[in-house]
């Protein structure tokens, strides 16, 4: 056999017992890229849990993540290159460019294709904008950006264009307005002058004791307002009973399509939430707090960074817990508490198997108090006015207040603070000004993408925790999307299932394969109902987290409540 002879290079003999490797295994690190990464990171820590934060710095600076920069970052943080790559490739807001590939355009316009934006004309924007903006601008569809009441929405760089038209987006691009302008808020000084942080000071001084505070929270019946609905006071007591040090994680990654309440409250009164957060930290004896903010809320992040700096410079309490603001990167799954914790730790946002639960083994292996933004937003009011004040509200046998994010075919969409247990018809008539002119109420999603779809004929069901389960739906974060006779439940289900297919983390087969299979099946003119029912059951029984378990809800509701659309 005539093989090509490859001569062996003669190595210089060195006086060592083992031959030293001339270069490390894997991708060679480009010295220029290494210097660029070092300059970006500056004096900041290279600890592993800051990986996503550092990836953002590179993405923001260069508009993408070049392979050379990923390799340099891995060396700088003393991580395996595979670890850096798998984290970067997991999140939608990172653009990885391999050797020989062309980098994306310097400017990206993301057009939200969530259901509310789709009903408001997002498909038309996606069809027309590429031609209007030219080849120098990348136009892509994006999952819900959390501005459903302002639909349709396009994001130019990091600047949202609300009620977007082709003309408005073009003007924003041409003016190079790629960052969001600051809005009016109750800032640190204004909040303090109106009595802000006085309640916290009373708690710290001993005027309020821990047991009485926790008891008021328990009596109020306040439940987690991110969607899970776990009793807040009970959660405080459970975590406080765990051996310290204890940590806290605040979830502001409201990625559920149709949800925007946290953003609206944060844009108006951030310190009301921060005071509630610090009171919870005091009551549970929290050492360190991590705030996880979805990446789509660029303006909120800039504002919150500034207000946190003021708070840290003038702490309203001694030995205030350390507070860290962490930035999401476009992954819906990170709204799930354990996936969020994985992301805070600098990893892929994949849900954990439980037990153990986050309250026992959470962030960095420590007992962790996890709360949604709005839950903490109500702490001050409840403690000042009493648990009875909160329970005095309610309708149809329910107690408490709820912030309903209402979007779709109503005259006045937005966040509606209303009694828990209000019906959809009452919500539309009393808080939203009725339906849009010339449109008739047809159906609604009571809990966002995963909460199911109900017909207008079922307009008398109380909208609250535990009231919708008998109908195959749930309230979740109270993201209410209203449909009219201009819409179909079939198209809504297709939109939702495409979203779930896109957002599945891929960890478990029932969800990864099931969402893709379901999305393909319901695109057909005639649905195979028997096959879809079997698929739904497998996903519910076998998926690790709520995404896969709840993803079939829209399909099941169409089959059950809108059979005429399938005829």
Image: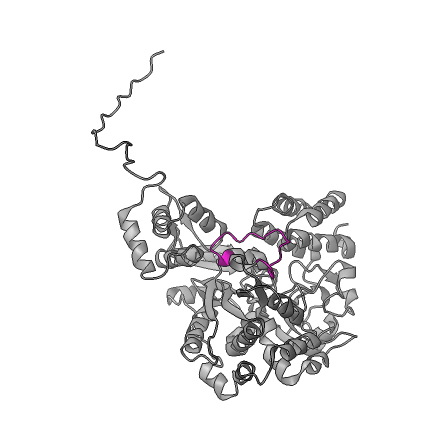
**At 75% from the left edge and 46% from the top edge, which residue is drawn?**
533
- Whether 265 is drawn above or below 512: the answer is below
Quadrant position of the N terminus in the picture: top left
111 or 320: nearer the viewer: 320
347 or 132: nearer the viewer: 347
- Whether 207 is drawn above or below 469: the answer is below
**At 59% from the left edge and 67% from the top edge, which residue is drawn?**
371
Measured from the top left, where is residue 272 in percent x and y? 54, 78
Relative horizontal placement of residue 554, taking residue 345 as reference (left or right): right
- Whether 138 is drawn above or below 538: the answer is below
Relative horizontal placement of residue 38, taking residue 551 as reference (left or right): left
Q: Is residue 355 magenta?
A: yes
- Whether 374 is drawn above or below 387: the answer is above
**What's the image's color scheme?**
one colour
- Residue 412 showing in the rendered view: no
**At 59% from the left edge and 83% from the top edge, which residue is drawn?**
208
Relative horizontal placement of residue 368, taking residue 446 as reference (left or right): left
Measured from the top left, where is residue 290 in percent x and y? 50, 65
- Quadrant of res 477: bottom right
Relative horizontal placement of residue 458, taking residue 144 as reference (left or right): right
The stretch in magenta equals 343-361
521 or 462: nearer the viewer: 462
- Residue 550 showing in the rendered view: yes
Q: Main secondary structure of the magenta part?
A: loop
Measured from the top left, where is residue 410 in percent x and y? 65, 71
Mark count? 0
**At 30% from the left edge and 56% from the top edge, which residue is drawn?**
38
């Amino acid at each position: 056999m005539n093989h090509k002879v490859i001569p062996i290079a003669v190595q210089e003999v060195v006086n060592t017992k083992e031959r030293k490797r001339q270069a490390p295994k894997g991708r060679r690190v480009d010295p220029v890229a290494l210097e660029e990464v070092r300059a970006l990171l500056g004096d900041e820590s290279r600890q592993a849990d800051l990986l996503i934060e550092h990836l953002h710095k590179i993405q923001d600076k260069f508009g993408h993540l070049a392979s050379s920069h990923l390799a340099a970052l891995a060396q700088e943080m003393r991580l395996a290159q595979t670890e850096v790559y798998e984290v970067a490739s997991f999140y939608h807001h990172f653009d990885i460019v391999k050797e020989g590939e062309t980098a994306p355009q310097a400017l990206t316009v993301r057009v939200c294709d969530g259901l509310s934006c789709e009903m408001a004309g997002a498909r038309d924007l996606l069809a027309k904008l590429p031609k209007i903006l030219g080849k120098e601008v990348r136009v892509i569809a994006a999952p819900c950006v959390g501005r459903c009441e302002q639909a349709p929405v396009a994001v130019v760089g990091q600047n949202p264009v609300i009620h977007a038209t082709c003309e408005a987006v073009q003007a924003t691009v041409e003016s190079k307005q790629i960052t969001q302008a600051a809005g009016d808020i109750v800032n640190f000084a204004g909040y303090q002058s109106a009595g802000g942080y006085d309640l916290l000071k009373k708690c710290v001084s001993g005027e309020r004791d821990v047991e009485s505070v926790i008891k008021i929270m328990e009596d109020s019946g306040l439940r987690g307002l991110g969607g899970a609905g776990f009793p807040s006071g009970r959660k405080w007591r459970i975590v406080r009973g765990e051996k310290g040090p204890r940590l806290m994680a605040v979830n502001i990654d409201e990625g559920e399509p149709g949800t925007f309440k946290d953003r609206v409250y944060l844009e108006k009164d951030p310190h009301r939430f921060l005071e509630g957060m610090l009171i919870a930290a005091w009551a549970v004896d929290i050492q360190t707090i991590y705030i996880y903010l979805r990446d789509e809320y660029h303006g909120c992040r800039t504002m919150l960074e500034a207000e946190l700096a003021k708070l840290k410079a003038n702490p309203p309490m001694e030995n205030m817990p350390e507070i860290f603001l962490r930035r999401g990167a476009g992954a819906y799954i990170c709204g799930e508490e354990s996936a969020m914790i994985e992301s805070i730790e600098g990893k892929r946002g994949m849900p954990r198997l439980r037990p153990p639960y986050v309250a026992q083994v959470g962030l960095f292996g420590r007992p962790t108090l996890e709360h949604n933004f709005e839950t903490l937003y109500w702490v001050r009011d409840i403690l000042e006015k009493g648990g009875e004040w909160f329970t005095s509200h309610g309708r149809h046998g329910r107690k408490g207040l709820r912030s309903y994010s209402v979007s779709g075919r109503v005259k006045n969409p937005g966040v509606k603070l209303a009694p828990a247990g209000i019906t959809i018809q009452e919500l539309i008539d009393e808080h939203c000004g009725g339906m849009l002119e010339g449109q008739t109420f047809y159906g609604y999603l009571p809990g966002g993408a995963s909460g199911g779809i109900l017909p207008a004929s079922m307009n008398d069901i109380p909208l609250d925790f535990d009231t919708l389960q008998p109908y195959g739906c749930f309230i979740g974060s109270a993201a209410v999307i209203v449909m009219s006779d201009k819409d179909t439940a079939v198209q809504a289900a297709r939109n939702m299932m495409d979203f779930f297919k896109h957002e599945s983390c891929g960890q478990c087969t029932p969800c990864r394969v099931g969402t893709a299979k379901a999305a393909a099946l319901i695109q057909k003119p005639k649905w195979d109902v028997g096959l879809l029912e079997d698929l739904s059951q497998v996903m519910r029984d076998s998926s690790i987290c709520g995404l896969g378990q709840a993803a079939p809800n829209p399909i099941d509701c169409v089959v059950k409540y809108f059979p005429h659309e399938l005829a």
